[in-house]
Image (tube, grey):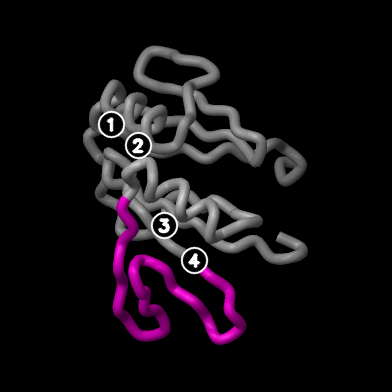
Amino acid sequence: MYFNARFVATLPAADLARAKAWYADKLGLNPSTEFPGGLNYTTPGGDFTLYETTFAGTAQNTAATWLAEDFEAAVADLRARGVGFEDYDMPGLKTDNGVATDTEGFKAAWFKDSEGNIHGVIQSRPGM
């Protein structure tokens, strides 16, 4: 059954060279393989592909989410690398200095990559 198959995220990039440099500089990630029009990345938590398209950055939703066991350390490391976090103020979600905290103390933050894709960093909980 296909639900037993490996799942890989796919993210658009308008400028693949710019995206490759951004992921290396800001996230410390280098492609595991390269192919015409795309890059594959392998991380301990999962894999993703960047592919070149003019539609990059058009989605207004979270395209990728990173689960962080140590949320504060992850956010501090990203900030130190020059990653800026988005601020939101909408019903059910308000950030303070780029971080949202729910009533149970669960934390999340969002940033955009060089191509405008929205990434979430969320505090890992048991069972995630």
Indicate the secondary structure of the residue bearing disc 2: strand
Q: Callout 1 environment at 10 Å: few (<14), some (14 to 19), or many (20+)?
A: some
| Circles 1 and 2 in contact, beta carbons < 8 Å | yes
Indicate the secondary structure of the residue bearing disc 1: loop
State the CA–CA distance, disc 3 to disc 4.
Answer: 12 Å
State the CA–CA distance, disc 3 to disc 2.
Answer: 13 Å
Estimate the x, y position of residue 15 in percent, counting from the top left: 24, 27
Which of the two labelled residues, at mark 3 and mark 4, occupies the earlier sequence position? 3
Estimate the x, y position of residue 12 in percent, counting from the top left: 35, 37
Which of the two labelled residues, at mark 3 and mark 2, occupies the earlier sequence position? 2
Residue 16 against residue 76 in the figure, above or below: above
Residue 80: within the magenta? no
State the CA–CA distance, disc 1 to disc 4.
Answer: 28 Å
Indicate the secondary structure of the residue bearing disc 4: strand
Q: Which residue is mark 3?
A: 62
Task: Give the magenta range.
Answer: 84-107
Indicate the secondary structure of the residue bearing disc 3: strand
Q: Callout 2 environment at 10 Å: few (<14), some (14 to 19), or many (20+)?
A: many
Which kind of residue does numbered mark 4 sit on?
Ala
Which kind of residue does numbered mark 3 sit on?
Thr
Which of the two labelled residues, at mark 1 and mark 4, occupies the earlier sequence position? 1
Which kind of residue does numbered mark 1 sit on?
Thr
Estimate the x, y position of residue 39 in percent, counting from the top left: 44, 22
Which kind of residue does numbered mark 2 sit on?
Pro
Q: Which residue is mark 2?
A: 12
Using the image, tell me which numbered label, if any, was put on residue 110.
Answer: none
Which of pointers 3 and 4 indicates the residue nearer the eye? 4
